[in-house]
Amino acid sequence: MCRGGAQSEFHARAHAAARRKFGREVFVRGVVEISNFCRENCHYCGMRRDNRSLDRYRAALDVLGEALLHRRPSVVTDINLQAGEDPVAVREVALPLVRLLRRHTKLGVSVCLGTLDPDSYAALREAGASAYILKFETAHTDGYELREGPGTLQERLENIRWLAAHGWFVSSGFIAGLPGETPEDSLESCRLAETLPLTGCSVSPFIPGESTPLAQAPRADIELVLNCMAALRLRRPDWIIPAVSALNIGQPGAGYRRGLAAGANLATINLTPPALREDYLLYQRERFIMDEEHLLASLEAVGLRPSTTGLIRHLESQRTPAPSPLQLA
Ligand code: SAH
């Protein structure tokens, strides 16, 4: 794996590729974690159904609506609704919240709600969500099975393709450095991402999750994560590649800034009501919470600035227009 001078040069090339396409602008999205109920049992994730140490919640619609309509930071152009795989929260929280955002704001809306059925996807689209984030977690089929990833890898990939074929902007993602995986396995995840009909892809460092079967496993090497991000950027100059907040674990501030300087072009501010945050347990209770102030400071440190154009707005502007009837004739 590339380190030292060659690595700096590699990241600089990825940064330059992102800047050529996107200028100094980074998209800023707010994330709201609407439910931590989950029917899946992924070994790496703190929300897995077997974790009995967690207080489960579904956020109240009026609390979320109030926070998003009246108290969101002004740099936020898009909202992402995230949850465990919880069809009840899709019906009772996500759908009405997407409608509310559509009715009262111009925010772009993406959702990250797990593998659902076609009717639920259609209802979310109808309500006004435009992008679906469905991570394939790892390209390593045996690892996926061993860690009880959601459903099967095959099914996850089929859902990604189905969503893209049904009018969604689809973003995916994987966890780099899962226990038992080699750097070559992570590169395989980069290669798998490139075969999918995506508008973007995230790379998350594996962080051992409290109260999970992998609690004692070593944390991912952040260099591997940054190298995967740079590799994706160089292969896909037009993709949306987030700097994930977990880059802050281990090297607070520094890891995140390095992600922004290795080709990332999306940053996320956490807008989950503070009372609920602690139970949205992906890995550790002491998460680094990215707020507006930290984000703006990180962007400035690497010479970047928040985009005034929304992420969904941008994707829509890039969509190849449907051929006009004249062209078809
Ligand atoms: N349930 C939804 C979305 C939220 S799960 C879904 O299945 O798509 C949140 C995401 O956090 C997962 O997709 C996974 O990629 C990531 N995650 C969970 N545990 C993690 C860990 N220990 N280290 C790194 N990423 C993790």
Image (cartoon, helix red, strand yellow):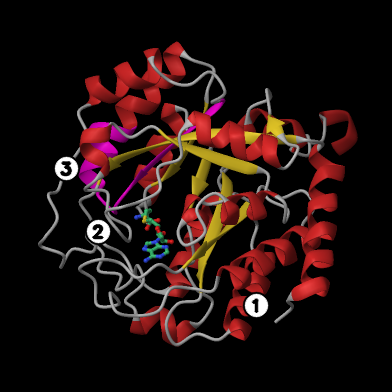
Distance from the alpha carbon under mark 2 to that under mark 1: 27 Å
> Ligand 1 lies in which image quarter?
bottom left
- 269 over 133 or under it: above or below: above
In this orientation, does residue 199 appear? no
179 lies left or right of 62: right
Q: Earlier in the sequence, mark 3 or mark 2?
A: 2
Whether disc 2's CB lies below 8 Å from ligand 1 is answered: yes
x and y percentages locating residue 293 in the rendered image: 51, 29
- 110 over 103 or under it: above or below: below
154 lies left or right of 199: left
Residue depicted at x 55% and y 57%: 172
Q: Earlier in the sequence, mark 3 or mark 1?
A: 3
Q: Are marks 3 and 1 in contact (CB under 8 Å)?
A: no
Q: Which residue is mark 1?
A: 187
Q: Which residue is mark 3?
A: 57
Among the 4 quarters of the image, the one containing residue 324: top right
Magenta highlight on residue 29:
no
Q: Nearer the viewer, residue 234 or 113?
A: 234
- 64 over 193 or under it: above or below: above
Chain part drawn in magenta: 77-94
Whether disc 3's CB lies below 8 Å from ligand 1 is answered: no
Q: Which residue is mark 2?
A: 47
x and y percentages locating residue 264 in the rendered image: 67, 50
Q: Nearer the viewer, residue 179 or 134?
A: 179
Residue depicted at x 52% and y 36%: 294
